[in-house]
Amino acid sequence: GLTKDADYNSPNLANSGMGYLKLEAFLRKVFSLRPLLMFYNLAAGLYFVTDEQEELFRKASGMDADGEDGSADPNADPAIAAAVAAAKKKAAKRKKIPTDPVSCFALVDRVFRRVKDAVMIIRSVHAIAPAGTGAGGLTPFERTTIEQLKSWAGSGTLRSSGTLIVMTTDS
């Protein structure tokens, strides 16, 4: 088989044709040609394979918007314009992407609708969307997260845009 599975915390290994890799490394190879590959878990929040992918996420989600139209002043000194652009980029980078799934997934939803062929790997999905005996035993946060996942699963728009969501669990 493709995996040597014990539990998620052990080195989940996948045969890549070049020996065995940890699951995350394997998924990075499988989806390396996608324009945006995101990983999410409750502890770390959302993280990216490259800085360019994080920048794409921030732009598509609207996180780097500062209320200006982004056009440069044609009369500005090029050195000053470059310094201002670098400062704006640094300030946008300081804005933290929310780690809680409700807030984070709202941004991800916006990105999914703007970036074709995006991939999100949700690790330990049971921590944010536990299997239960009904809505009565779930927190509002868990119910909201489950509804978001169901919405994505049923979205023809996301399906036709090539969006892919992979969920893994320890249990």
Image (spheres, grey):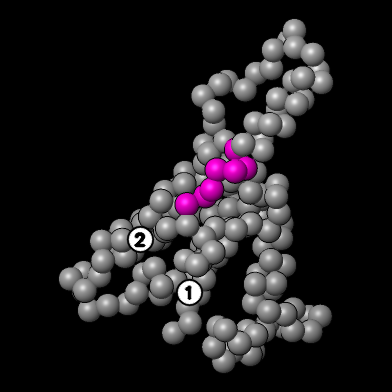
Name the residue nearer the viewer: 28 or 44.
44
Look at 81% across and 18% down and name the residue there. 78
Residue 72 in the image: above or below residue 130? above
Name the residue nearer the viewer: 109 or 11.
11
Q: CA distance from mark 2 to mark 1?
A: 13 Å
Residue 155 screen position, x and y as percent: 40, 53
Amino acid carrying mark 1 in the image = Ser
Amino acid carrying mark 2 in the image = Thr
Q: Is residue 70 visible to us here?
A: yes
Name the residue nearer the viewer: 49 or 27.
49
Mark 1 residue element: loop
Dot 1 surroundings within 10 Å: few (below 14), some, or many (20 or more)?
some
Residue 73 screen position, x and y as percent: 69, 12
Look at 17% across and 71% down and name the residue there. 136
Look at 54% across and 58% down and name the residue there. 46
Name the residue nearer the viewer: 129 or 150.
129
Residue 36 in the image: above or below residue 2? above
Residue 125 screen position, x and y as percent: 44, 71
The residue labelled by disc 2 is 145
Quarter-of-image position of residue 10: bottom right
- Direction from residue 22 to residue 134 in the image, left or right: left
Where does the magenta region start and end? 92-98
Residue 153 screen position, x and y as percent: 40, 60
Q: Quadrant of the N terminus?
A: bottom right
Where residue 124 is drawn, which disc sits there? 1
- In the image, residue 94 lies in the stretch drawn in magenta: yes
- In the image, residue 48 lies in the stretch drawn in magenta: no
Look at 53% across and 39% down and name the residue there. 63
Quarter-of-image position of residue 92: top right
